[in-house]
Image (spheres, grey):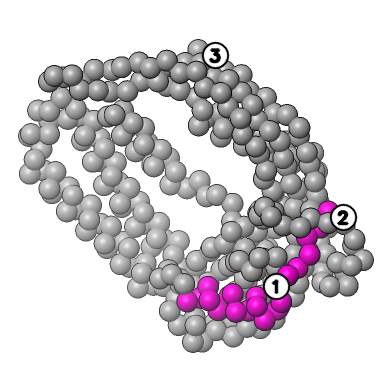
């Protein structure tokens, strides 16, 4: 299977220049000093995994409600039917040099593979990953995410299965563009079907990095000193410990975010083809679990 290119070289260059001007995390001088060095069109292999998840969940959801002057836990019975489609892609070759781990095939015209036609238009990279094993991994990850979202607080019964599994190898077009900035070479990949930035690397804005770190620490200090002024009243309330935990985690989240912006902001990586980053998720998940307990 293959997808043909619709975006010209000039349109890809314009998309990159527009990306340079977007946001405050990238070096402001990019739009003035950047030089586009070379570009070529290439087709990369992506494994497309599809399936339909159906399932049934029985259990109990718990919520906190206030009755009079006290909080009580109310249990609501749950009978939940799950029906959801899976349609994901994953690179069928080692893409560490190019940074694109997935593409969006929604609405694209997918044609039978004609390698000679692709080679006449650009480079064609060969797959080096097992299709079935990769597809099984992708579907299993998607299934676990659907299960997590569907599960109640207490589960008495659950059943899930995946029907109509389909696996395809799709060759997808990307413009690979290299540019120079202050004697350094960077790379951007543009989706040759819809013109979006699939993966872009650019030097970061050092002023924004410093502001993020200083600003997040200042915000955490402000919230912390404000908390100390009302510490006694907070501890005397019924949910004082929970509130203290929420505020403490909020302060840690501010500082963690600012530190990440400062530490990793020297080089900016963005694009629709980036796989989801897991760093920092544990903090946000903990914050969500605590706030859910206050409901």
Q: Is residue 141 something that shows in the picture?
A: no
Q: Which residue is mark 3?
A: 157
- Please check the rendered image and state whether residue 3 is part of the magenta-colored stretch, yes or no: yes
Q: Residues within 10 Å of mark 2 (few under 14, many from 20)?
A: few
For image coordinates 27% across by 23% down, the residue present is 64
Quick check: 28 above or below 213? below
Q: Which quarter of the figure is the C terminus placed in?
A: top left
Residue 257 image point, x, y percent: 36, 54
Q: Residues within 10 Å of mark 1 (few under 14, many from 20)?
A: some
In the image, which disc is placed on residue 7? 1
Camera-near label (1 vs 3) is 1
Q: Is residue 109 above or below residue 244?
A: below
Magenta residues, as a range?
1-21
Q: Position of residue 41 (x, y in %)?
A: 76, 72
**Distance from label 3 to label 2 (Cα)?**
43 Å
Marked residue nearer the N-terminal end (1 or 2): 1
For mark 2, what is the residue? 112
Q: Is residue 153 in the magenta section? A: no
Q: Mark 1 to mark 3: distance in Å?
A: 50 Å
Viewed as shown, does residue 32 lie left or right of 113?
A: left
Q: Is residue 64 left or right of residue 131?
A: left
């Amino acid at each position: 299977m293959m997808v043909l290119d619709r975006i010209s070289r000039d349109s890809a260059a314009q998309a990159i220049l527009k990306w340079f001007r977007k946001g405050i995390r990238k070096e402001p001088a990019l739009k003035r000093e950047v030089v586009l060095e070379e570009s070529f069109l290439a087709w990369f292999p992506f494994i497309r995994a599809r399936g339909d998840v159906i399932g049934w969940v029985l259990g109990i959801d718990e919520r906190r409600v206030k009755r009079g002057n006290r909080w009580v836990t109310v249990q609501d019975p749950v009978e939940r039917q799950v029906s959801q489609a899976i349609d994901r892609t994953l690179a069928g070759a080692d893409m560490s040099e190019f940074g694109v781990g997935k593409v969006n095939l929604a609405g694209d015209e997918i044609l039978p593979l004609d390698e000679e036609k692709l080679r006449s238009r650009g480079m064609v990279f060969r797959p080096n990953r097992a299709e079935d094993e990769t597809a099984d991994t992708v579907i299993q990850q998607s299934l676990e995410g659907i299960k997590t979202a569907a599960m109640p607080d207490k589960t008495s019964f659950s059943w899930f299965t995946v029907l109509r599994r389909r696996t395809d190898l799709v060759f997808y077009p990307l413009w690979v563009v290299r540019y120079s900035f202050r004697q350094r070479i960077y790379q951007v990949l543009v989706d040759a079907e819809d013109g979006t930035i699939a993966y872009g690397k650019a030097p970061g804005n050092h002023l924004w990095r410093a502001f993020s770190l200083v600003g997040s620490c200042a915000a955490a200090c402000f919230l912390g000193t404000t908390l100390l002024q009302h510490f006694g009243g907070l501890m005397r309330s019924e949910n004082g410990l929970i509130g203290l935990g929420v505020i403490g985690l909020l302060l840690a989240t501010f500082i963690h975010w600012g530190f990440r912006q400062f530490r990793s902001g020297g080089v900016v990586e963005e694009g629709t083809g980036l796989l989801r980053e897991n760093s920092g998720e544990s903090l946000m998940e903990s914050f969500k679990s605590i706030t859910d307990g206050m409901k």
